[in-house]
Image (tube, helix red, strand yellow):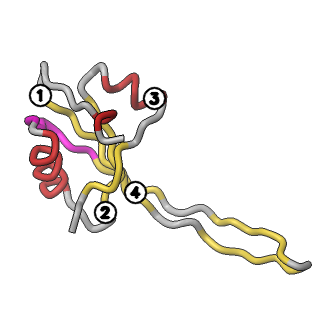
Amino acid sequence: MNVLKRPIITEKMTDLNKQGKYAFEVELKANKLEIRKAVEKMYGVNVETVHTMRTLGKKRSKNINGRIVTGRTSTTKKAIVTVAEGEVIDIYADL
């Protein structure tokens, strides 16, 4: 099971990269220790802290053939990883 799904690249996270913080979308059942080991193994850096958050899926509805179909987007989990001072993760190399 691969714990890390993808890096999150937004303006807000790009600003946090200057402070040594990087965001990743991770598996829902992954814990902080698994995330730490996966980042250290994949990028070869020392991880100081890991903060996680779950975002619930939003309700969506659309009109199909005169009927309203409702559903929900998937729930995701994000992790913000702080690396040791002076170390950098090159997330653009994987793209």
Q: Which mark is nearer the camera, 2 or 4?
A: 2
Separation of marks 2 and 3 at Cα, in angstroms: 22 Å
Residue 90: percent from left, percent from top: 25, 31
Task: Tell me where the magenta segment starts and ends, as one range.
Answer: 45-51
Q: Can you give x and y, in whole percent of width and height, for residue 77 in the image? A: 37, 57
The quadrant of the rendering that contains the C terminus is top left
Q: Which mark is residue 54?
A: 4
Q: Which residue is mark 2?
A: 27
The residue closer to the viewer here, 73 or 89, is 89
Q: Amino acid at mark 3?
A: Lys
**Mark 4 surroundings: few (<14), some (14-19) or many (≥20) residues within 10 A:** few
Earlier sequence position, callout 2 versus callout 3: 3
Q: Which residue is mark 1?
A: 84
Q: Is residue 38 above or below residue 88?
A: below
Q: Secondary structure at mark 4?
A: strand
Number of other residues with Cα within 10 Å of mark 1, as a class: few under 14, some 14 to 19, many 20 or more: some
